[in-house]
Amino acid sequence: MTHSLAITGGTLVLADRVERGNLLIDGDTIAAIGAFDIPADAEIIDATGLHVAPGIVDFGVFNVDKRACIAGGITRIALMPDIMPPLDDPGLVQRAALAAKPDLWVHPLAAATKGLLGAELAEYGLMRKAGAKGVATGRGWIADSGVMLRALAYADALGLVLVSHAEDAGLTRHAVATAGETATRLGLAAATAAAEAMAIARDIALVCETGARLHFRQATTKAGFDLIRAAKAEGLRVTCGISPAHLMLSDIAVNEYRSYAHLSPPLRSEADRQAACAALKDGTIDVLCSAHDPRGPEAKRLPFADAAPGMAGAETLLTLGLGFVREGYIDLPRLFTLLARAPSALLGVPSGVLEAGAPADIVLFKPDTPWQIRGEAFASAKNTPFEGLPVQGRATATLKGGRVLTRST
């Protein structure tokens, strides 16, 4: 006998609208939404004053950080292959896929090349059977165009998306910042932002040859967005993501050598940040991701050039995303397309929507609850470039497969 759970009185975030209604869960599946008769034996969650939305699918994280994900309303992650050892073997992929069940579903992205060295293709077919939901180049770019061409063709033959890091390594090697006034004043090794557009242009040219599906994990420059926008207009299967950091912060955030703002790709100019906001608004950006790459104090509290790039982003993804709704860049259904529906489609999993028959992966949140981001309160590593930022909106409950994992007031 399956367990029934009714979420009542909440505001449902559906694919194309927001409306008041109830939601019924039967076992691990959504059974009904809107108006229906609540079974007499159903457990009831009163969601009055709350929004009810699909659980977030965080695309392209670098760590299986279960507590942080649950706290942030994340129910599934697409795991990048850059763990130790890299995900270039079926056994490693299978182990990663099982790492956090049943509380968090991990969808591994297989390493595009053995050891992520950019030379020899890994065995995508066997890794797909072991649970890989895509193929990724990792934190680096495949410099050899012949290898990248074969990677795209192989992944496409298996129905897998290829996830690329969009920076030409020949230009960015040893750089820790984007070339410009800030990097010059601080004396930081820097690379031109054109490195992104060059990588994107090369990869799009290879998509023209193969017809493959390609996702840029993060696009961050005006030139990059222009290329992606044009590729979409031509009907190519090209998509891109971005993190809230690159939408909200420019390279001036690294002033005073703030290593918590040392990210990959690095923060860009204010003009590129404005272009990113425009790309969010016009639909060029497909996925909003946390870029969760937590680092401990031993890796971040170092001179800027020596600190590891990355940030803890899982616990702030939802609240920062809600800020873009309040500022009028997107509406609430569009936010959850970026956070859940689109990443689910990239992975080929049936989540990311509130509809009958879908997995009961759900987040309840208060959209206007005020709080202040403090890294010391995070469940994961404490390194956030948003330290001290006042924000609004917070997850109050996360459900995975109909099970309530966490609840707060």
Image: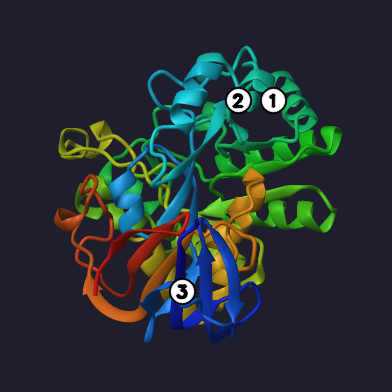
Tell me the residue at 56%/86% (across/down).
19
- Is any atom of residue 74 visible in this view? yes
Q: Position of residue 221 (x, y in %)?
A: 55, 54
Labels 1 & 2 near each other (Cβ < 8 A): yes
Say if 73 sits above or below 10 in the image: above
For disc 3, the marked residue is 6
**Horizontal side, residue 184 vs residue 97: left or right:** left
Residue 113, quarter of the rendered image: top right
For disc 2, the marked residue is 142
- Is any atom of residue 117 visible in this view? no
Q: Residues within 10 Å of mark 1 (few under 14, many from 20)?
A: many
Disc 1 secondary structure class: helix
Marks 2 and 3, Cα distance to the nearest angstrom?
Answer: 48 Å
Disc 3 secondary structure class: strand
**Horizontal side, residue 312 vs residue 166: left or right:** left
Labels 3 & 1 near each other (Cβ < 8 A): no
Q: Nearer the viewer, residue 87 or 327?
A: 87
Q: Position of residue 50 (x, y in %)?
A: 39, 81
Say if 90 sits above or below 355 in the image: above
Q: Position of residue 393 (x, y in %)?
A: 34, 75
Tell me the amino acid under the disc marked 3. Ala
For disc 1, the marked residue is 148
In the picture, the disc for residue 209 is: none
